[in-house]
Image (spheres, rainbow, N blue to C red):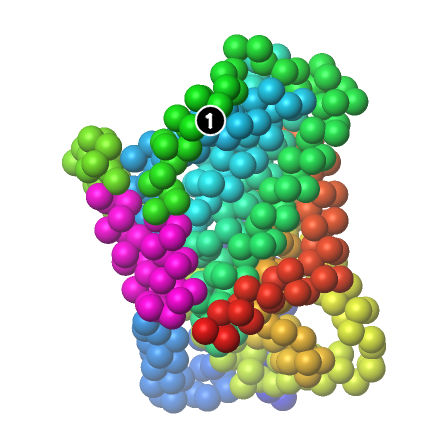
Amino acid sequence: MEPLHVGILGFIVFVVLIAVRVPISYGLAGVGTLGLFYLYGPKAALAFIPTQVYSQASQFTFAAIPLFLLMGYLAFYADLSKDAYDAARAWFGKVPGGLAVATVYACAIFGACSGSSLAECAVFSKIAIPEMVNSKYNKKLALGVVAAAGGLDVLIPPSIIMVIYGVMTEQSVGRLLIAGILPGILYAGIFAVAIIIFCYLKPSFGPIVPAVDTSWHAKMVAIKKVWGVAVLFGLVLGSIYMGWSTPDEAAAVGVVGSFLLLLGRKKFKWSSFKEAVVDSTKATAMIFLLVGGAVVFSAFMSVAGVIATITKGILGMNLPTWQILMFLYILYFIMGCFLDAISMMILTLPFVVPILQAKGLDLIWFGVIISMLVVIGAITPPLGLNVYVMKGALGNEVTLEEIFAGAAPFVFLMILITVILSVFPEISLVLPRIMLGK
């Protein structure tokens, strides 16, 4: 059998395995290993596979992943998420839909010290949703805001998605993290404006809560509560932007900073610290299993000639750049309904990156775009991991259907943001370019 035919058959087998709910990391590794066995022979494959996996997974930049995760968990146990919500509520509590707007900005603030949108959705499901529901907010609006605003964690650094994308595409992780700042601000701003306009037109969906204290004294007190987030953000991103540290070194500084905040706020408990370490370790292990499986599968696809054939076929069609991008956006939108963010990137980037490079597109900019696309996938059925995390956090108080229905209008806002970032790539690129000039 020709190598290309073996590669196509292997890809079909992988799709079938995913359809019958085989874990993606196992499917990638299993199909890739069997394919390389067939093409190389067992002896050569057994020598090749461990070397490839080790060379990729041992890249020092990957050290930022467990450190950013641990930083976020420690920040959560230091109650920074609750303080972020209190601060945002003090500033926006008296505008139409004020608590929903506060939730958006609280997610943005906490996103500056957490790298996981799933963790953010779980946290604010317990903090923001009960308060909005008790304040007579429309339940679907409350659920949708948390599900969609949780995606801010993917754009606003530190972002685990950006780190993985940077390693896979051999782009500067530091520049990618910086690139997400302005799009994250745009994301939060568009959400806030849309909520205010909607609740102004339909006050019953997001009534103004008289009991919320929005005096200047309350605002100043609230700001003092979130100084820790500002310090962490400044330490991590400032050191990367100024070129004083690499992303993994900055992540280590962030862990130390969040641990000191935990001690300084007298929130330290051995049980919480142990849970933070264990949760970070579990998440890291899952990510590295996916990366390892992806290395084997990508090597198989490359050796079989599938990647080169697809790239040559698409470029040979001489499609305009905008049509190729439209095709990729639709592909990611569909895949997002069935796969998690990391799996989507791992499966597609080996095919997509050569096409983008051939078209002369900036891979830093596309890192922001793909982050937006995977965020959309996180709230669309039937998978929608953010939605399932919220369901787990809220239990029987809500149904999956209610969360998906609440999140649906925000999908259109996310698509609008993606279009804006596509038409105006400088929004993503201006800060990284200034950074290069330093």
Identity of the residue drawn at 60% across and 20% down: 94
Q: Which amino acid is tagged 1?
A: Lys
Question: Does 130 sit above or below residue 19?
Answer: above
Mark 1: few, some, or many residues within 10 Å (few <14, many ≥20)?
some
Q: Residue at x 60, y 66 (%)?
A: 429
Residue 163's place in the image compared with 225, above or below, is below
Q: Is residue 126 above or below residue 67?
A: above
Which image quarter holds the C terminus?
bottom left
Q: Is residue 300 magenta?
A: no
Q: Quadrant of the N terminus?
A: bottom right
Q: Could you tell me which residue is drawn at 63 percent across and 74 percent down?
A: 362
Residues 375 and 245: in front is: 245
Q: Residue at x 65, y 35 (%)?
A: 192
Location of mark 1 (residue): 219
Between 85 and 213, the residue placed more toward the observer is 213
Name which quarter of the figure residue 291 lies in. bottom left
Front residue of 374 and 361: 361
The x and y percentages for residue 191 are 66, 38
Residue ranking furthest to the top: 211
Q: Please identify the quarter of the rendering in which residue 5 is found.
A: bottom right
Q: Which residues are magenta?
A: 232-260
Q: Give the number of callouts.
A: 1
Q: Measured from the top left, where is residue 72 in percent x and y?
A: 36, 45
Q: Position of residue 383 (x, y in %)?
A: 59, 44
